[in-house]
Amino acid sequence: MHSGILYSTAQALREILMSLVGVPLLVDIIMTVICATILLLIMATSALVFTLGERKICAFIQVRIGPNRVGPGGLLQSVADMIKLMDKEDIVPRGIDKWLWVLSPILLLVPSALIYAFFPFDDGVILADVNVGLFLLIAITSQTVLPFLMGGYASNSKYSLIGGMRTVAQMLGYEVPMVFALMGIVMLTGSLKMSAIVEAQSNVWFIVLQPLAFLIYIVTALVESNRPPFNLVEGESEIIAGPFTEYTGMRWALFFLAEFSNLMCIGILTTTLFLGGWHGPDFLPGFAWFWIKTFICVLFYQWVGWTFPRLRIDTMLSFGWKVLLPIALVNVLLTGVGIYIYNIM
Amino acid sequence: MAQTEKFVLNMGPQHPSTHGVLQVQVELDGENIVGATPVMGYLHRGIEKLMESRTYVQCVPYTDRLDYVSAMNNNLGFCMAVEKLANIEVPRRAEYIRVICAELNRIASHHVFIGSLTNDLGSATGMIYAFRDREKILDLFNIICGARMTAHYIRIGGVAADAQEEFLRDTQKFIDYVPAMLDEYDRIFTGNEIFQARMQNTSIITKEDALKYSMSGPNIRASGIDYDIRKIDKYGAYGDFDFEIPLGKQGDNWDRYIVRLKEIQQSANIIQQALDNLPEGPYMAKVPKVLKPPKGDAYHRVENTRGELGFYIVSDGSTKPYRVHIRRPSIVNLQALDTMCRGMLLADAVTAFATIDPLMGEVDC
């Protein structure tokens, strides 16, 4: 029923395992572990690739050269960075809430790793194709508020606390328009299943049918992933680094990893929800199209980030509640009317 | 029952956007600022006192370290004060070269302003663009005197060396580039919606407040008060040039930014006129090897990039000044920070700080 290299490889692997092990449940478990490992690897490598990519792209935008010393053309720069981070002293400040402080970066990584399970990378290639996929995805991404708040509170630093408060305000303000914007897609698809959403775009991408939702999604996605111009949580000129001011070395690297993982997530989500997922002309396999689109999206988000100054908290919140939310509601109404008219015709 | 209370946030002296080692004690109610107190002195080197134990000629390099992003203007102020004290007549050519250098440095200093402002607003890209263009001016200084920032080029009685053909040619090139440069700034920052939204109608200083705090420089001109020492005193060769004083309307952050942008244009205009009419002749007056100004005192003020920079020198007839007092514009302008920040948000404090454009080397002296 499905086609594509990845799907057939997985099927072949399953058959081999089946002949070796013989118990279907055990085979399922092994397959899941393999998938999870691959996804985690993708996530970890993405951080490495995107650090270099971001630094190079930012350098290009800022008329600079960027890293060019480590490895050919600076390719190994992010590896060197990682080694440096591991090598750093682990400073634990005094007066902190130890447990919350230690847990915060780890917990932040959990939702960013978890959502990879719901991404359809190719035809039939999805770890957990649950029938409330989109719903679960939104639910999990909104969990990122908690670790930020935890880190902000536990650090016993005023900058961190302000950053933590900003996280809550901004996530609340932008989660709502985002959900309403995605409502249009759900209405058109008639399902929350991720594979069904991609399937529904085999002829027309949702960027054509839902342009308003697309625009709202771009803005809210930037906010959700703390990308500039909405990086108020870490607004370095005001509150230094927000919740992660007091973290060093590998603990800080975990925040960093989560940030880049989130950047890739919003790229993937934009691709999946609006740009047809793995659909594309036949000369390239589905997953290739998927990654090409994702990288273009990520590039776009980085471009935006390096061009604009940061918003102020009040402008940002009023924009979310007073502009984006009404537009998202109007979009739901328009979609409903559109579907009604389409059905009559 | 939920209860909120105000708290004090110490911004600085180690903070990414305090432009040095200023500490601002911000009293916050959530994100709203209730009060802001600048705490100064982290960079105090006692320059005024140090000058008392140096000869007049040895004092000049200290002025480079006051406002280290517009060193030429400081050199100019001190040298003119000493010249006033010792009755030294400066050659015409030296006066013109001084104006060229001072105005070039004004542009370079405004580049730092634009760069740090955009960086404080969260756009690191802006900083790189401004600093890229500042580099061109620093290269010019490198040609004329071999130093880039702390130039020590303007000396008592004239300038250290004559302006070479190469310098004049490259300066002309830079002046020709200024319109394109300003156009690029307009496209990147000035026209940006977020930039405008964050700057307009924030941290307003009214005319009355500006006078009350005896502010000077672009900060007072942004509040709409026509006050520029270059026009009032016409010191040096400034009387020969035709230029405008850009004024702001209401004294918000936006006006302070626009005034400086327009000043870049006017400075380029002055430099162009000076290049066109550069007189021939000596570049240095006959100054005695051992400079002993007669007993007495002299005050001279110049329009520094940040405002009115004054040097008050008392001479007891010896080779060293008896007392030097420096009227630094940055420290005076900084006093308005509290008025500017009250009722604003935390992010505005950073913007207000950037648009006052104080330089800690000058504040602490």
Image (spheres, coloured by chain):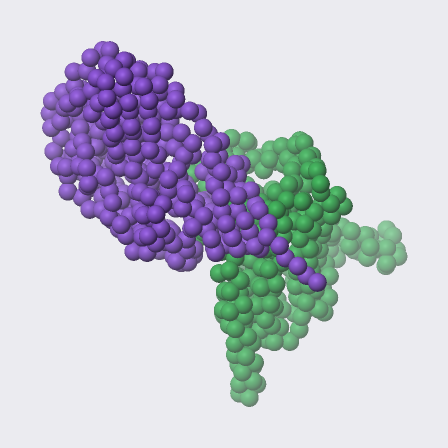
Chain colours: A green, B purple
Left or right, A73 with reference to B61: right
Q: How many marks?
A: 0
Identified at 62% across, 54% down, the residue is: B5
Q: Nearer the viewer, residue A113 or B60?
A: B60
Reply above or below: B57 against A82. above
Identified at 59% across, 71% down, the residue is: A180
Left or right, A99 with reference to B276: right
Q: Quadrant of residue B227?
A: top left
Identified at 68% across, 35% down, the residue is: A91
Residue B42 image point, x, y percent: 49, 31
Q: Is residue A79 visible?
A: yes
Q: Nearer the viewer, residue B31 or A62?
A: B31
Residue A132 image point, x, y percent: 71, 69
Residue A31 image point, x, y percent: 78, 54
Q: Nearer the viewer, residue A272 or B216?
A: B216
Reply above or below: B57 against B364. above
Residue B357 image point, x, y percent: 38, 42
Left or right, B102 with reference to B90: right
Identified at 55% across, 61% down, the residue is: A220
Q: Residue furthest bottom?
A: A344
